[in-house]
Image: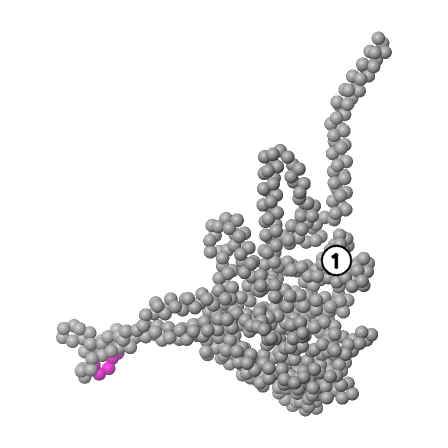
Amino acid sequence: MSTKIIANESNPNDLAAEILRKWQYLFGLRGNWANHWTEIAERLLPMDSWLFQNYQMITSQGDKRNYELYDSTGLLALKSFAAILDSLLTPRDQFWHNIRPEDPALMKNRAVRLWFEDLNNTLFQYRYDTRANFQAQNQIQYQSLGAYGTGINFIDKLYRERGLRYKNIHLGEAYLEENHQGLIDTIFRRFMLTARQAYLMFGENLPDNIVEAKDKAPEEPFYFIHACYPNEYKDERRLDYKGMDFCSHYVAEQGPTLLKKADRSDYEGYRSFPYAVSRYYQATNEAYGRSIAMDVLPELKTLNEMYKVQLKQGHRAVDPVLLAHDDGIIDGFDLTPGAINPGGIDENGRLLVQPLPTGNIAIGEKEMAVHQEVIKDAFLVNLMQILTENPQQTATEVMERTREKAILMAPTIGRQNSEYLGPMIEREVEVLQSQGALPKMPAVLQSAFREGIGYKIDYDSPITRTQKSEWVAGAARSLQFFQEISNATQDPSIMDNFNLDVAAPAIARINGMPESWIQDQKVIQMKRQQRAQQAQQEQMVKAAPALASMAQATGQIKKGAVNQ
């Protein structure tokens, strides 16, 4: 079945019908995934367990959803995993990326360097604005990655104000498709709105029955589809939706009917893909990602069942089943504190009532601990504890363990940089540029961009900085080694092999120093010239008495010669 959507502007509802058929096709492809995600949600995110199977998306608010969850190791490990990714990739109190031009030669221009620093500051300012809601949605993104293997964040401009707005899209609502290069470029999102919410979003453009429900039954649910896919009929000469890179259409299942937002045109579009989609890792020919939870799902199931058995055994041990001799003497047995039970022993003092032996609880706890450690290892919880296990370790040992941690985390970090953070930053730049929120660009950079030179993203998160710290450590070890040789041989020429003028600012940037704190090369040369002139003047001042004495002696010699 072809999944290509052909635009039909003469009859918008024909386009709506095509979008609905395409969604039904993608819905069919996702059946196995929905069953898999439901199993995981029941054990890690019980509040989401209903979203993958409940086609109507209706549930009782506040109902209990963790009735199948007995052991919380996986649930807590998932929360720790999200916190770990957040602290290593996108820490709130640090600048975790820098933007630079593709041409390194442009960075020699101080105005260009300062502009990119202003651009970076602008992105962080708008991203962490309270109205943007980035932190909360970003945390959900990482939880979705750990649980389901796929996370989706929607980035758009702030409604009626300058700025950015983020919304994490639950995987239960999203239907994905890749292009020929393995990049997600198509998303169909099916979501529910009440009549009141739908009217706020679409106004009078809604079907009549939804408009009427707005007053009569404002909480009645209705279903909509947002289709976002590449614009195969893009006209480069157009500045409206026809010239945009991605189509964006809203469809009411009632009809189906093509809708327009209350404050926008009939047909919408985006110049950049508004969804940042990342996968934890992938299997061949699959658009959706696979997750840590899928790897340890057998452990999660086993641990949950073991915990149920352990609870029963613990209950029996604390409140044991009693075995009594059937001789007609014991009519009933009172277990209240201080009670006296006649007939519980025979005339020789032997117990006639004894507890039923229970299983070995200690063995069960030991087996459970093994499964718990496997789950914690998978969710990187134990990996993050390597630096705290031995507080007496030396600085060299800390550096080596940190390097090992960076190596183990590299595959995870690399994928999130390329699939999630990179597209998100590019989208942010495009949205802020369309709002006129970016700093004024210097002329030399405008000329470079017109020639097709773009920008690149340098990730400067704690984990990438840890990876780069090996360079700094290597430089420190090398300089110390050769300095000792220079001191031993009394030959400083060996140090000429190192270009410290290049190394110094590079090391400062690796260590996170802001660009504005690094001095411009022209200023450095001027300072060196002034230092050289000052040193020369000081030498002349120090030599002045000796020169005067020499001049005086020379004059006296000449005078003596003349007199002679």
Residue 118 seen from this side: no
* Image location of residue 245, percent across then percent down: 74, 74
Q: Nearer the viewer, residue 414 or 141?
A: 414
Indicate the position of residue 150 as horizontal and vertical percent values. Answer: 59, 72
**Predominant SS along the magenta part:** loop
Q: Quadrant of residue 422?
A: bottom right
Q: In front here: 38 or 137?
A: 38
From which residue to which does the magenta span run?
330-336
Q: Is residue 91 above or below residue 394?
A: below
Q: Residues within 10 Å of mark 1 (few under 14, many from 20)?
A: few
Residue 421 picture quarter: bottom right
Residue situated furthest top in the rendering: 564
Give x and y (percent) for residue 317: 31, 72
Q: Quadrant of residue 92?
A: bottom right
Q: Which residue is mark 1?
A: 103
Q: Is residue 45 magenta?
A: no
Which residue is outermost to the left?
347
Percent of width and height locating residue 112? 76, 56
Q: Secondary structure at mark 1?
A: loop
Residue type marked 1: Asp
Q: Quadrant of the C terminus?
A: top right
| Picture residue at 85% right of the left edge, 9% below the top | 563
Above or below: residue 337 compared with residue 437: below
Does residue 43 appear in the picture of this structure? yes
Residue found at x 46% / y 73%: 298
Q: In the image, is residue 331 part of the stretch drawn in magenta?
A: yes
What residue is shown at x 41% (from left), y 75% (from top)? 305
Q: Is residue 28 above or below residue 438?
A: below
Check the picture and name the quadrant holding the N terminus.
bottom right
